[in-house]
Amino acid sequence: MLIALLAGFFVWATIGLLERKRDSEMDGWQSFVLVLVPALLGFVLSVGLAFLGLAPFAPLLGLLLYFAVPLLMLRYQLEYPWGRSCAYAGIVVFYALVAEFVVVWGFAQVSA
């Protein structure tokens, strides 16, 4: 959850900067939801795959969730055009990966 919180903050800040001149429907909570929903779905999916003995596929499916879920949420809930939805979904994936690397690296430095 620390990774989702960190990524959600950066997604909120970036999308807030990009949407400041537009009359946007997106608020702070929705930008956090763009990160939290794929994180929770990825957790449930990884638990299910581990139960079935297919755990090595969980990170790849989690990365796909970080793109597909925000893309579909932005397109069908907020009715953004496909181009902007893809760009914002890419921002979510980028910050999710950056946050994961930062947290994992930070814990590795503390434990070493």
Image (tube, helix red, strand yellow):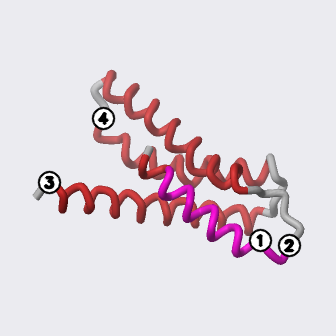
The CA distance from mark 2 to mark 1 is 5 Å
- Label whose residue precedes the other's in the sequence (1 or 4): 1
- Label whose residue precedes the other's in the sequence (3 or 2): 2
* Residue position for label 4: 55
Residue 74 image position (x, y, % from top left): 74, 54
Q: Which residues are magenta?
A: 5-22
* Residue position for label 1: 19
Residue at 42% x, 60% y is: 99
Q: Nearer the viewer, mark 3 or mark 1?
A: 3
Q: Nearer the viewer, mark 3 or mark 2?
A: 3
- Quadrant including the C terminus: bottom left
* Residue position for label 3: 111
Q: Which mark is residue 22?
A: 2
Residue 86 image position (x, y, % from top left): 66, 64
Q: Nearer the viewer, residue 5 or 77?
A: 5
For label 3, the SS is: helix
Residue 94 image position (x, y, % from top left): 49, 66
Determine crowd level at label 3: few under 14, some 14-19, many 20+ residues with C-alpha closer than 10 A. few
Residue at 47% x, 39% y is: 42
